[in-house]
Image (cartoon, rainbow, N blue to C red):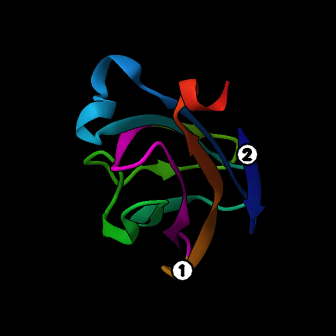
Amino acid sequence: MGTVVTRGIRVTARAQYEEPHSDPKAARFIFSYRITISNRGPEAVQLLRRHWIIRDSLAGRREVEGPGVVGETPELRPGEDFSYSSACDLRSGFGRMDGTYLMRRLSDASEFRVEIPEMHLSFAHAAN
C-alpha cells in the first residue's frame, strides 16, 4: 500500500493479485486495486481525469487516460473521501503502475494534478 499527498489531496493505493481471474499459462495476470482519495485541503475539488502509466515486465509500458474514474467525476468537500476499485491486466506476473489525477478547485475552476502512488504488481506464487 502506498500513500502520497499533493496540495492537500491524499491518495492511498493498494493492489492485489487476482488468482481466480488470472490464467498464467495464457499470459493473463489480473490485478485489482483499491484507491481512496481524501480531501485534506481547505477547498472543495472535483476529479476530472485520470492518467495511468502501466509497466509490464514483458509487454513494456502503456498509458491509460480518460475522464473520471469508474464512470464518475466525484466532488470532494474538505474532509471527504472517495474510494473505488478497478483492475489491470498484465502479460507477465510482474509490473507496476502509477499516474496522476487532474483535479479542479470548485471555487475558481483552477486545475492541478495529483500524484497516484506507485503500486507494485507481483504474481503471488512467483514471489514465494
Tell me: 6 left or right of 32.
right
Residue under numbered circle 1: 108
Where is 81 relative to 69, above or below?
above
At x 54%, y 66%, the residue is 99
Give the secondary structure at mark 2: strand
Where is 126 relative to 110, above or below?
above
Where is 112 relative to 121, above or below?
below
CA distance separating discs 2 and 1: 30 Å
Res. 113 image quadrant: bottom right
- How packed mark 1 is, by other alpha carbons closer than 10 Å (few <14, some 14-19, many 20 or more), is few
Residue under numbered circle 2: 2
At x 31%, y 48%, the residue is 72
Nearer the observer, 46 or 90: 90
Nearer the observer, 12 or 97: 97
Extreme top residue here?
Answer: 20
Q: Is residue 97 magenta?
A: yes
**Image location (x, y in percent) of residue 12:** 67, 44
Residue 41 seen in the figure: no
